[in-house]
Image (spheres, rainbow, N blue to C red):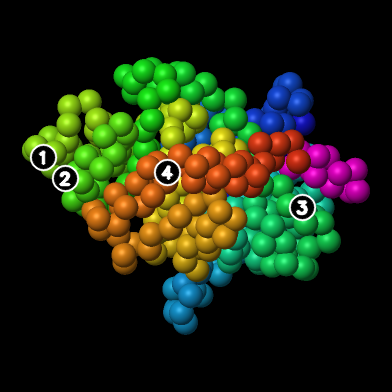
Amino acid sequence: MRVVLTGGGTGGHIYPALAIGREISERHPGTSLLYIGTSRGLEGRIVPEQGIAFENITITGFRRSLSLENVKTVMRFLKGVTRSKELLRKFKPDVVIGTGGYVCGPVVYAASRLGIPTLIHEQNVLPGLTNKFLSRYVDGVAVSFKESEKQFAKCPDVVYAGNPCATRVLKADGRAGFASLGLAPGTPFALIVGGSGGARALNEAFVRMLPLIGKLPDVRFVFVTGERFYKETESAVAGSSHAAAGRVKVLPYIANMPEVLAAASLYVGRAGASFLAEVTSLGLPSLLVPSPNVTNNHQEANARSLMNAGAADMILESELSGETLIAGISGILGDQARRQAMASASRSLGMPESASIIYEQIARLQRKR
């Protein structure tokens, strides 16, 4: 097969696209993948590192208030459509798959105008502007949350498929995760992550929590700060007399995140859709601190979906402190029966077969074409 993937800006759009591409490649050895993105987004670095061909277009997102900049955005969109048509005619894909972010707008729209089968995947409960726009032109939509289906009433083929990142993490080896952290297999630990770029509010709350970790004497803490916050957080932790030796591990990032998640007892952090897909696929309870700095406040909607199902607790960033953080962690890891109930609820939401569901939808759309 020949497949075009598009979507970008953040890892939450990029990694699902790569997971779909991986599933297709496993089903069809010899598949050719082309990723179309922007050089400004993370896809410009992440995709080439995966050995996938990458092409760049220039496009920006719409501002939600009236602005002359939006006029320029319309012009960039039209130029992006023209550029995308050139790339698509040259590559001749069998299908074009978009996973959100403004870059996929002109690419998927151009594909629909050229009669190429198209699919978009929506990761969040509340859809982004680009996917809402595209839903009236594409052949199919795959959603990660059941609640999202009604948002795409204008598309004839909407499937509740989950997030394809869930498929990848299910194959992860938890023993390798323990080994990479220098922990004995079975050691209970809370994995605290502020997202791919880190989160200052979570970092500060973690440092303030250190004097209180004695409430959980048997639990270790693995804290992922993000590169930009690592030095200051590591220094603050090292200078604390309360960080018992061997109980707190501070890292700038984790390269083998699926393996570490598979080993963790609790996930604490942002409510990005890809992380939640991995967490529920593994049946991992979570304490979520949704970022308030995202479009439509969609992370809070994601978190509430898990919370309503009994799979997670939530702390709003406005309520985050060292005290509320340790109380939230203690409320789960300090109560074995509750932790197991949350793990069961989390597992019931997981869709480890997500990539396969999306593949079958793509195959069906191709047959219809």
For mark 1, what is the residue? Answer: 240
Label whose residue precedes the other's in the sequence (2 or 3): 3
- Lower position in the chain sequence, tag 2 or tag 1: 2
Q: Give the crowd class for mark 1: few <14, some 14-19, many >=20 residues within 10 Å.
A: some
How far apart marks 1 and 4 lie (CA) works out to 27 Å
Instruction: Depth check: give the residue in front, 77 or 303.
Output: 303
Looking at the image, which residue is at 51% across and 35% down?
47
The amino acid type of the residue labelled 1 equals Ser
* Secondary structure of residue under mark 3: strand
Q: Is residue 264 magenta?
A: no
Res 253 seen here:
no
Residue 178 appears left or right of 159: left
- Secondary structure under the numbered disc 2 in the rendered image: helix
What secondary structure is found at the residue carrying circle 4? loop
Picture mark count: 4
Q: Position of residue 209 (x, y in %)?
A: 22, 48
Determine whether label 2 and label 1 are within 8 Å by CB: yes
Q: Which residue is mark 2?
A: 211
- Tell me which numbered mark, 1 or 4, is placed earlier along the sequence: 1
Front-most of residues 216 and 111: 216
Residue located beneath label 4 in the image: 335
Query: What residue did someone put label 3 on?
Result: 159
Please say if the residues under marks 4 and 3 sit with CB atoms less than 8 Å apart. Answer: no
